[in-house]
Amino acid sequence: MATSATSEQLLVIIDPAARRGDGESVRIAKDVLSAGAAAKVCLPDSPEEFARVLGRRGSRRPVVVGDDRALVRAVSLLHRHRELSDCALSMVPVGPASLARSLGVPPGAVAAARAVLEGSVRRLDLLVDDSDGVVLGCLGIPPASARASVPEPVGTGGAAHPWLRSLVRRVAYRPAVRLRVEIDGETVTDLDRPVEAVSVTAVGQGVASVEIHPFSFAESGSPVRTSARTITVTGENFHYRADAVTSGPVRRRTWRVAEGAWGLVVPRG
C-alpha cells in the first residue's frame, strides 16, 4: 500500500562513498532536492557520524544519497531504535544500487530525486533476525560470492561436456553445507542431507519465498520451494549474506517476516 509523502522538509544524508565515487550525481541530486523542498544537507564522514545525523533528524524526512549499503545502514539504525515504522525513507541511488532498484527506486539522480519530491510511501516487508539484524532484499546461505565464476576444466579447450562442468562446479565451487532448515516450526531438510544453497526473500503480505537447493553430483538437483513466516537455520559455523553484507559464522539463526515494517518513497503509480 502506498500513501503520500507529505513532509516537505528533508534531511539529505550524503554517504561518503557516494561523494568519492560520483560527485556529479551527488551535485545533481542536491540541486534537484534543494530546488523542490527545504533541504538540510549533511555530509557524514563515517558510519558513526551517519548514525548521529540520522538520529537528530527531528521532523525532517531522511533522504539517503548513496548505494545499497547506505540504505541498509539507515534501515538498520531506525529498526534498532524502534523508529522504523514511523519514518519513511527516501533514496537517491549513487553507486551499486541493484537492491534499491528492485524495491522501486528509479535509477539516475534526476529521476530518483523527483520521486523523493513527488512520490508516495510504499510499505514493505522486512526480514528480522534474532540478533536484531534486518534483510531488505535477499538472504543467501552460504554467501554466493565463492560461486560467482566457474572456469573450464583443464584440458577441455573450452568445450567441456555439460556434466563435467557441473561436476567441477559442484565439487570445487559449490561446497556442500550441512544445515537444518525449519519453516514455521517444521523441519524441511536436516543435517544428514547436505545442501548447496538456501535463499530467502520477503515477497509481501507477511510471507517470504524460500528455496533450498540440495547438493548433488547430478546435472541438477530439484530445489525445494515454499513460503514461510519464520525460518530457522542450524548448522556448524555457517556464513550468510544479507543484502550486501556477509555475516557469521553462526551456529543458529532465526528470521521472521515483519509485515509492512518500513516505508520507502517511490514514484506514484
Image (cartoon, rainbow, N blue to C red):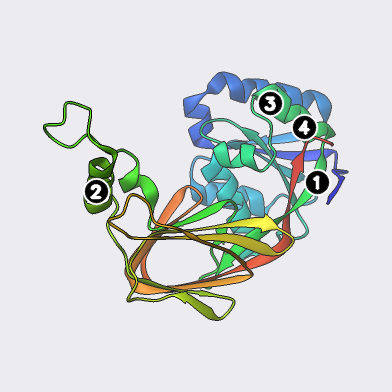
List the residue tagged with mark 4.
115
Q: Decide if residue 82 is in sight here.
A: no
Pointer 2 and pointer 4: residues touching (CB < 8 Å)?
no
Residue sitting at x 54%, y 22% = 23
In the figure, 117 relative to 135: above or below?
A: above
Front label number (3 vs 1): 1
Sequence-wise first label, 2 or 4: 4
Q: Decide if residue 266 is in sight here.
A: yes
Front label number (3 vs 2): 2
In the figure, 65 relative to 175: above or below?
A: above
* Viewer-closest of 102 and 227: 227
State the separation of the CA atoms marked 1 and 4.
10 Å
Q: Is residue 129 left or right of residue 149?
A: right
Q: Amino acid at mark 2?
A: Leu
State the separation of the CA atoms marked 3 and 4.
14 Å
Q: Is residue 252 left or right of residue 205?
A: left
Q: Amino acid at mark 4?
A: Ala
State the separation of the CA atoms marked 2 and 4.
47 Å
Sequence-wise first label, 1 or 2: 1
Q: Is residue 216 left or right of residue 13?
A: left
State the separation of the CA atoms marked 3 and 1.
21 Å
Residue sitting at x 60%, y 25% = 26
Which numbered disc covers residue 121?
A: 1
Q: Amino acid at mark 1?
A: Val
State the separation of the CA atoms marked 3 and 2.
51 Å
State the separation of the CA atoms marked 1 and 2.
47 Å
Front label number (3 vs 4): 4
List the residue tagged with mark 2.
167
Residue 36 point in image, percent of width and height: 82, 27
